Amino acid sequence: MINTSKRSAALLEVDGLSVTYGLMGASSRAIENVSFALGAGEAVGLVGESGSGKTTTAMAIAGLLSPNARVSSGEVRYRGNVLPIDDDAAMRPHRWSETSVVFQGAMNALNPVHRIITQIAEPCMLKLGMPRGEASARARELLELVGIPADRGTAYPHELSGGMRQRVMIAMALACRPSIVIGDEPTTALDVITQAQILKLLGKLRSQLRLALILITHDLSVVAEACDRVLIMYSGRIVEEGTVAEIFAQPKHPYTRLLIDSIPNPANGKKMIRPIPGDPPNLMNRPSSGCAFHPRCPSVMAVCPTEVPSIDQFGQERVACHLYRSSQEDRGASHA
Amino acid sequence: MNGGGTSRHIGRILIRAIVTLLMVAILNFILFRVIPGDPAKLLLGGGRVSATAEQIEAQRQNWGLDRPLLPDQLVDYLSATVRGDLGYSFKFRGRHVADLILERLPATIVLVAVAQLIAIVVGVMLGMYAGWRRGGALDNGGTVASLLLFSTPSFWVGMILVVVFSTKFGWLPGYGAYSPGGTISSIDSILDHLRHLALPVTALALGLIGQYVLVARAAMSDVVTEDYMVTARAKGLTNRQMLMRHAFRNAMLPVVTLIALNLGYAVAGAITVEAVFAWPGIGGLTVEALNARDYPVLQGVFLLLGASIVVSNMTADLAYGLLDPRVR
């Protein structure tokens, strides 16, 4: 709504998207008025605590919302065309061919009873219509691409380490040559060294295959390493968006500031983790009015509990916070 | 892929089965030695006829009962069992227990095999479907019906079937495996046998269907929530492809265990139903032997029951290994 028109060349545009979940008769908003754009080959990090709506946002883009989810407003456009994200059957041709997902392969995302080569070849056969032999050859190629010897293809998931399984997951995601890959916490549950290797691999593949990457994570260091841009989500809304460099150097939203401050950095004497006071709101107990962060915000003002801040543009950045409201109004005329 | 691991896995299963069989045989031996009653006296009329002490002693020597239980009698028993000699029946004088069992076994196997086959096909399909569409009409209705079927004793179902279909309407025979009066032609005899099978098979199958529906439904509804099903959906698979390629095989794991274990009770499980329908199988033989205190026959039947359970467990382990690479 705000800046999508500017980026008409965008690969993916999320425009005012709100998704609600029905829970035992009641319904709750998982995400509200989420808008952003993704260019071809661009890497965007989606950062937030559990329940912040980052996964819902990503699953909506992939057309993988659960049956009790409802798109209450907004839309997602892919190459300018509106995606039928709330129609399971209509989304099927889009899935994996255009947008694929790297789930946490270290967990149970691979089917335990099938050989990994079969699982990688499966979308080639079913989506691209390749004959079995050709699909196997493609699967072997993909394994080599992610750094697994093709001979290991006959292994079952449980015979591989967590890092190897994550590589298999990545190989699988590339099977149908998608233009967008969504990484759903792809390095969580891996040790730091493996984590770094996986991020390096993703970066390499991204430039090699010109992939756009959406990285869902709660780990800002992952974003710093792998992304161009970052979206900070809190309680179902985007609170700040900017380039990685800007966000880390000059975080604007108090939440982002506290988030970056909470990272221990032994280099400048910050050895302790500094937690943000208070608890993140969950789906059912969000503040009923105003900015969702106001109960925990150190810079809270009188307006905060009553009015939801709109998300406003500041150069390359967007922030949703009353602190910046006056300055926005000052620049409002020139910006519009 | 690693053939060494797989053959070692199979070897382990086989050795375990053989050891268990040996234990079953030894327990079976001990069980019938601690039961009160002197077999020599039983042979000589079971107390109803007074036998002299010399006669009893002669019998004891004749059957080796004067020798020590351990190891002589046990070794005798085990070696005879291995040779297929299960001794002589008390009731049917002079007849080998092994012959009696082999005579009755086919009727039981036919009854149980047909009932199991029907129950597996119907029960697993319904259960898988209910689990796949959890919360649907078939799931809600089917689960209640299955619970009811599973918890109703099959002999009671059998009696109701006899009362309704045999006594009241006279549609189907409710007694025996063949009509009296001998066979006319082979085709007629087969049809006659099938008509006799109908009610006992139904009585047995209904309870089994309930059991298979419940287990298959639980297994499938667990699988549906697994992460790899989300992956399959993300891959753009149709519901049918997700079901057939990813869900079914994983959901079959607990079902296969149940099938194999049920086959172990193939011989014993039909005892009450056989009694209701006077079915000439192992169940009938067991009841007759119990009434006549025919210990050798009971000992033989028990050994058969134990052995079939051990063998079916072994089959379950082997089948599981085929379906699930993680246990190989």
Image: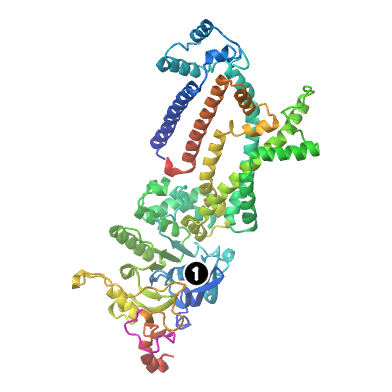
Residue at mark 1: A60
Residue A158 at least partly seen: yes
Question: What amino acid does circle 1 point to?
Answer: Ala
Q: Nearer the viewer, residue B55 or A302?
A: B55
Tell which subunit mark 1 falls on.
A
Figure check: A314 above or below A72:
below
- Seen in the picture, residue A174 relative to A71 is either above or below; the reply is above
Residue at 63%, 40% in the rendered image: B153
Residue B170's x, y, as percent? 80, 36
Query: Where's residue A114, x and y in %?
Result: 47, 48
Asked whether residue B132 is drawn in magenta, I would say: no
Residue located at (57% from left, 13% from top): B43
Name the residue nearer the viewer: B67 or B19. B67
Residue B186 horizontal/vertical position (percent)? 76, 25
Q: Main secondary structure of the magenta part?
A: loop
Image side of residue A236 versus residue B137, left or right: left
Residue A297: within the magenta?
A: yes
Q: Which residues are magenta?
A: A296-309
